Amino acid sequence: MKMTDYDLMLFYFGYQTFIKTADDIIEQYGMNRQHHRFLFFISKLPGITVKELLQLMEISKQGSHETLKTLKAKGLIDEEPAEHDRRLKQLYPTSKGEALIQKLNKAQIDLFQQIFQSEGEDWHAVTEAFAAKRPGYDIIKQFKDKTN
């Protein structure tokens, strides 16, 4: 498949649609995308250490402090010392954290299922359907049949 500028634009707008689905929900809890990402990985990898989480997400320790502090303060995660090395902190979702991540995941999965049902499994059609949900899509439609 030859990729075009239009394909790159579709991917950008498609990604925005996918992310905004969860962003709109997590904002209702006074948090943002980074909180969602942290909670997602902590939920899927219970017992992950802070160091492992930072490595996985490719962020610095400074970039994590406030996010982890907020997730703990809201009762969404717990932090416990590792049994094998008490200096390491392991992160676990609480039942409240699990409930929130399930809500966020469901919204994104439902969006995917809705688009797959209407568009099939063709990558281009699916990406275009995601992109079409963004206001900027009307501006980029003119590039659809251009080849560069």
Image (cartoon, grey):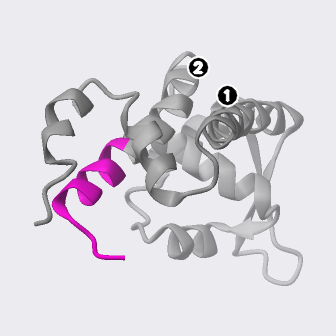
| Front position in the image: 95 or 130 | 130
The label on residue 29 is: 2
Q: Is residue 38 magenta?
A: no
Residue lying at 56% horizontally and 50% vertically, measured from the top left: 37
On the image, numbered disc 1 is attached to which residue?
74
Question: In the rendered structure, are the residues bearing label 2 and label 1 in contact, judged by CB atoms less than 8 Å apart?
Answer: yes
User: Three-letter amino acid code at disc 2?
Assistant: Tyr
Q: Marks 2/1: CA distance?
A: 9 Å
Q: Is residue 9 magenta?
A: yes
Q: Splitting the image into 4 quarters, where does residue 88 fall?
A: bottom right
Residue lying at 89% horizontally and 35% vertically, measured from the top left: 95
The N terminus - image quarter: bottom left
In the picture, measured across the screen, residue 18 lies left or right of residue 91, that is: left
What secondary structure is the magenta-colored segment mainly? Answer: helix
The magenta span reads 1-13
User: Three-letter amino acid code at disc 1?
Assistant: Lys
On screen, residue 18 above or below 29: below
